[in-house]
Image (spheres, rainbow, N blue to C red):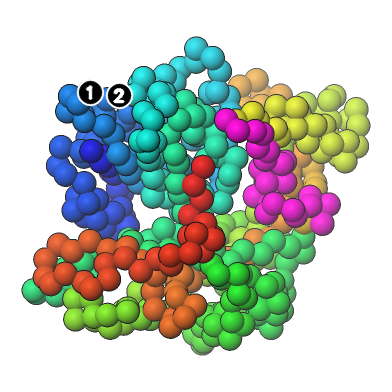
């Protein structure tokens, strides 16, 4: 029997609303976990009680806002911090606050498949360390799958038919120590980065440059509106127009214009890695404080034992860099005034700064350019191909990570 948990969405959160419609058609009513069960412990406990005697748990779908570093559901009811990687590490203690029910902890019977935990949340599948630690938290016997790209839900409908689409958008992301200063350099950076499509072939440069050129079309929109500078305080986000093609008519549509599936984002990223009073700050140079922060991270969070081996997450990845990127090449360090609000003690904080640029666009077939998706029919004729994901194992693994 399959189960699904969909959180309460904020007003205007059309993605969560569409995900709920999708899973209401995929999962029977008896398998829909109440939205009041907002943490993983309570979700699994509810499933353990709700499943009929003699039945087995098949797939558990968990809808979540997410990134490479976090999920939006809590792990336990007592948790107060967001569900980031460090919290997931800290909670991994024998006899700790998280206790999965025995059916999730037990190995599947001979010849049976393990319970499938499918997280429908953006990019969390990019972090092998996070997924393997989540698997370990649940006892190490379940199988966990999550998308490596943005996960998008939307509805296509008319008076006689309605379908909900579950698809992906690539996250093409660049990091720079110094800001990109002009549009031409932005296009060169993206088109020269060698971003691969799901089959390993390079993303056509023309597709990326066409999307980026939309940024300079509005008369009043100058580069300061989409290229962050040393004074930019918040993330810059601009929707991009794109029209996706379907492999067959969906609610009478062979193509569909959708803003939420393509977007440009940029920001000056600032990460505080240490805070201290003036005595501690004055005892050593900024570079040594950075070295100490990295050493503290490595000692507690770098390497983690999981079923089947060891996973790691570097201090650079913790700051938001990609695997393989170095702190030296991408981050500028500074110290700034700070104050302990509890005591009023004046001090300094150590801040790392870099610039991030994201181009988000739909994952389409490398063969014919049609959107790759899963779908559910609410009403109307059945689609000939309700699922159009590729069939090659390597290509599926480039879209979804399973551990």
> Disc 1 designates what residue?
49
- Residue 47 included in the magenta stretch of the image: no
Q: Secondary structure at mark 1?
A: helix
Horizontal side, residue 201 vs residue 390: left or right? right
Place of residue 2 in the rendered image (x, y in percent of width and height, measured from the top left): 25, 41
* Labelled pair 2, 1 in contact (Cβ < 8 Å): yes
Query: Which residue is rendered at x = 71% and y = 38% of the image?
Result: 273
Are there few (<14), some (14-19), or many (20+) residues within 10 Å of tag 2? some
Query: Which residue is rendered at x = 35% and y = 21% of the image?
Result: 101
> Disc 2 designates what residue?
45
Q: Nearer the viewer, residue 127 or 374?
A: 374
Quick one: which residue is furthest to the top in this view?
Answer: 95
Horizontal side, residue 132 vs residue 290: left or right? left
Horizontal side, residue 325 vs residue 59: left or right? right
Span of residues in magenta: 307-329
Q: Looking at the figure, which quarter contains the N terminus?
A: top left
Place of residue 105 in the rendered image (x, y in percent of width and height, measured from the top left): 41, 23
Are there few (<14), some (14-19), or many (20+) residues within 10 Å of tag 1? few
Q: Is 79 above or below relative to 30?
A: above
Query: Which residue is rendered at x = 18% and y = 53% of the image?
Result: 25
């Amino acid at each position: 029997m399959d189960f699904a948990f969909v959180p309460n969405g904020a007003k205007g959160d059309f993605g969560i609303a569409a995900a709920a419609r999708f899973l209401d058609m995929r999962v029977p009513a008896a398998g829909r976990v109440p939205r009041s069960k907002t943490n993983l412990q309570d979700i699994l406990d509810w499933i353990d009680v709700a499943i009929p005697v003699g039945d087995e748990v098949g797939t558990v779908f968990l809808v979540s806002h997410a990134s490479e570093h976090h999920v939006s559901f809590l792990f336990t009811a007592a948790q107060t911090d967001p569900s980031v990687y460090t919290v997931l590490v800290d909670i991994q203690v024998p006899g700790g606050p998280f206790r999965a029910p025995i059916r999730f902890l037990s190995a599947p019977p001979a010849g049976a498949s393990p319970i499938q935990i499918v997280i429908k949340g953006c990019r969390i599948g990019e972090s092998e360390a996070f997924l393997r630690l989540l698997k370990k938290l649940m006892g190490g016997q379940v199988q966990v799958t999550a998308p490596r790209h943005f996960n998008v839900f939307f509805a296509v409908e008319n008076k006689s038919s309605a379908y909900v689409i579950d698809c992906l958008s690539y996250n093409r992301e660049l990091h720079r120590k110094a800001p990109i200063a002009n549009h031409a350099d932005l296009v060169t950076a993206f088109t020269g980065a060698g971003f691969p499509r799901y089959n390993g072939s390079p993303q056509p440069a023309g597709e990326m440059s066409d999307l980026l050129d939309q940024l300079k079309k509005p008369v009043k929109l100058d580069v300061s509106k989409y290229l962050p500078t040393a004074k930019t305080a918040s993330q810059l986000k601009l929707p991009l127009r794109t029209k996706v093609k379907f492999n067959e008519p969906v609610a009478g549509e062979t193509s569909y214009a959708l803003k939420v599936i393509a977007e440009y984002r940029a920001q000056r990223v600032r990460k505080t890695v240490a805070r201290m009073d003036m005595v501690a700050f004055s005892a050593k140079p900024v570079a040594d404080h950075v070295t100490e922060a990295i050493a503290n991270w490595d000692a507690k969070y770098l390497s983690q034992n999981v079923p089947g081996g060891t996973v790691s997450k570097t201090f650079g990845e913790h700051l938001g860099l990609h695997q393989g990127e170095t702190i030296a090449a991408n981050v500028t360090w500074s110290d700034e005034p700070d104050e302990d609000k509890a005591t009023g003690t004046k001090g300094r904080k150590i801040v790392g700064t870099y610039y991030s640029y994201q181009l988000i666009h739909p994952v389409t077939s490398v063969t014919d350019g049609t959107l790759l998706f899963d779908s559910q029919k609410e009403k109307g004729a059945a689609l000939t191909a309700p699922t159009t994901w590729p069939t090659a194992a390597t290509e599926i693994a480039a879209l979804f990570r399973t551990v």
